Image: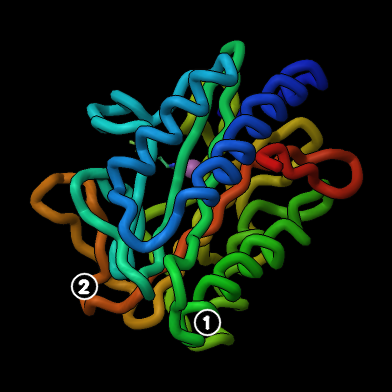
Amino acid sequence: MITIKSHREIELMRMAGKIVSDTFKEIAKYLKPGITTNEINEIADQYIRSQGAIPSFLNYEGYPKSVCVSVNDEVVHGIPGSRILRDGDIVSLDMGTIYKGYQGDSAKTFAVGQISPEAQKLIDVTRQCFYEGIKFAKPGYRLHDISYAIQKYAEDHGYSVVRELTGHGIGTEMHEDPSIPNYGKPGTGVRLQKGMTLAIEPMIVMGRRNIRVLDDDWTVVTEDGSLAAHYEHTIAITDTEPQILTL
Ligand code: MF3
Ligand code: CO
């Protein structure tokens, strides 16, 4: 069941989302070669709590940390630890907060030091996939119009879309209906309505789309070892243009 949020609920989600966005800015100050993924987790956890919010990932289905930190061929759900980030790495940070019972969820891929033009292009195209998708995030369109726009932009650039993982509705729970694939058939799926709040999150890889999960039972990597990027915002459908709540 897809719940429709009131104006008040959307404003609380925007506050949760602002804390996520500010946390990215805080981490960005320290994101340099030599930092460990655990240090990133600590910065995020402390900053989120300093803002009166709760990190939503911690203990979610047993997830042990407050942020997902996924490096290079890791697509999502990398667990922070002693790994040291090196010049030329790309790192996807995914995090969520709960503020007064409402959720915000966002992810971005960052460059560590100087990265290759190929890696930068993957990051840029993945981000643009999100913006291509939300062109259709309004009444009059259907859910998979968003999905198809993401897929088309990624594949037109020679990349692949990970299919096993999707975006999702969000509100008082991190994962609500509907599931939002990053591929699909235009003109299908539920009709979009004002008050729906969605986390749209293209996960795009340079090589083949196949993935596997590491022995830690969380970290998702590309089977062929190719680089992966992630870009996610929580948005609200309105009568007109969608609003991005995680800014
Ligand atoms: N942010 C992920 C999503 O967008 C969820 C992270 S799973 C967790 O769906 F276990 F790490 F919380
Ligand atoms: Co999400």
Q: CA distance from mark 1 to mark 2?
A: 18 Å
Q: Residue furthest right?
A: 240
Rendered position, 219 above or below 61? below
Image quadrant in which you'd find residue 154: bottom right
Identity of the residue drawn at 42% across and 59% down:
32
Q: Which residue is mark 1?
A: 155
Q: Nearer the viewer, residue 89 or 189?
A: 89
Q: Is residue 8 above or below residue 210?
A: above
Residue pictured at 74% horizontal, 52% vertical:
137
Q: Amino acid at mark 1?
A: Glu
| Label 2 secondary element | loop
Q: Residue at x 61, y 52 (%)?
A: 189
Residue 156, image x, y percentages:
58, 86
Q: Is residue 47 left or right of residue 3?
A: left
Q: Mark 2 highlights which residue?
A: 223
Name which residue lies at 53% across and 21% down: 98
Q: Decide if ligand 2 comes within 8 Å of the CB at mark 1.
A: no
Please give the label number shown on residue 134: none
Of residues 149 and 74, the one drawn nearer to the viewer in this rendering: 74
In the picture, measured across the screen, residue 65 lies left or right of residue 26, that is: left
Q: Position of residue 101 (x, y in %)?
A: 57, 13
Q: Which secondary structure, mark 1? A: helix
Q: Amino acid at mark 2?
A: Glu
**Ligand 1 occupies quarter:** top left
Residue 27 x/y as whole percent: 50, 45
- Residue 178 showing in the rendered view: no
Mark 2 neighbour density, 10 Å: few (under 14) some (14–19) many (20 or more)? some
Q: Earlier in the sequence, mark 1 or mark 2?
A: 1
Residue 115 against residue 186 in the figure, above or below: below
